[in-house]
Image (cartoon, helix red, strand yellow):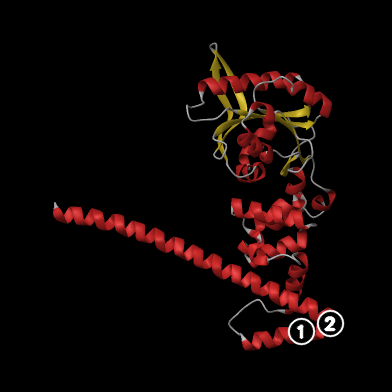
Amino acid sequence: MQNNSISKNYLVILSELKNKVRQAQIRAHLAVNAELIKLYWEIGKTIFEQQKAQGWGSKVITQLSKDLINEFPNMKGFSYRNMKYMKQFYEGYHGVIIGQQLVAQLPWGHNVILLQKTNSYEERLWYAQKTIENNWSRSVLVIQIETNLYQRQHVTEKITNFKQTLPQAQSDLAEQLIKDPYNFDFLTMRDSAHERDIESQLVKHIRKFLLELGAGFAFVGEQYPLEVDKKDYYIDLLFYHTKLHCYVVLELKNTDFKPEYIGKLNFYLSAVDDILKGNNDNKTIGLLLCTSKGKITAEYALRDISKPMGISEFKYLENLPESVKSNLPTIEEIEAEFS
């Protein structure tokens, strides 16, 4: 019995020590990264100032690159191209204490992407914050910037009733999650595609769909069945949001917005709150996606509705672009390849 007791105690201690080692590794990695970012900022500052004071041109920077590489052969990052990025980096954050900036927590590769692809200081900081929150890789960061996530989440007047129907902390988070429009360009659909076709394709591409929806969405089901008064009803797409701690009902309409859509969504929210919602869950949220909406019509439709809802547009590729079509092989070419 004593040996078993010692074994169990040892395993508990071992587990605790493993966690401490991992946490120390993470802290050490972050500290090293922050120092490297500050170093690059300092090099960028020196180049910027010497270009102004001494007229440093590309030849001097090329020589500086070679000398630093010779002095520190095991240290990467001193290429001529990277030197230019360092100067851009300093210019982009000129006048701030770089160690106190969010970008000091990001790897250098992420910072280069932000310099290349964003247009303002505010936009860069916003993407830096989202990258840290969601642990985006460089490729995911590129996708989010190229699909204009910042602009789509900064629409001045989003059409929701969250402020009237949710507590402030929850309504603020819900507002941040809504985009307008949603970009489903990873789908290629027919001009006359029905909602079910689009739903099925979204589920088929669920990883890209969840990436577009944003962090925290967990997929529950497509055409999720609910029985009310011995009749079956089907929710287009049902999710659970891990940060808001609530179900999210998503209804998809491949048409212009119509006020009557809100009545059906309201019905689904009531049913989910009654049938699925647990004691620790918050109010179920509804999201209606249409191909287009009239602002005033949508606002009238949401007025006096007591359940939290948002209305957004979505878009997808109706047809392959001509440039892509021209690069696709013909049936004859494919057959010839196999023969």
Identify the residue shown where x is 71% and y is 57%.
337
Residue 59 at what x, y percent from top left? 81, 85
Does residue 322 appear left or right of residue 134 in this picture?
Answer: right
Residue 4 at what x, y percent from top left? 18, 53
Residue 235 quadrant? top right
Residue 153 at what x, y percent from top left? 73, 43
Mark 2 is surrounded, within 10 Å at the Cα level, by few (under 14), some (14 to 19) or many (20 or more) other residues, namely few
Identify the residue shown where x is 68% and y is 27%.
164
In-front residue for pair 220/338 = 220
Count of marks placed on residues: 2
- Residue holding disc 2: 53
Amino acid, disc 1: Thr
Q: Which is in the foreground here, disc 2 or disc 1?
A: 2
In-front residue for pair 8/172 = 172
Residue 127 quadrant? bottom right
Identify the image quadrant of the C terminus. Answer: bottom right
In the structure shown, which secondary structural element does the residue marked by tag 1 occupy?
Answer: helix
Identify the residue shown where x is 63% and y is 88%.
71
Is residue 335 among what the camera can see?
no
Give the mark, 2 or 1, whose residue is nearer the N terminus: 2
Does residue 200 appear left or right of residue 122 in this picture?
Answer: left
The circle drawn on residue 62 is 1
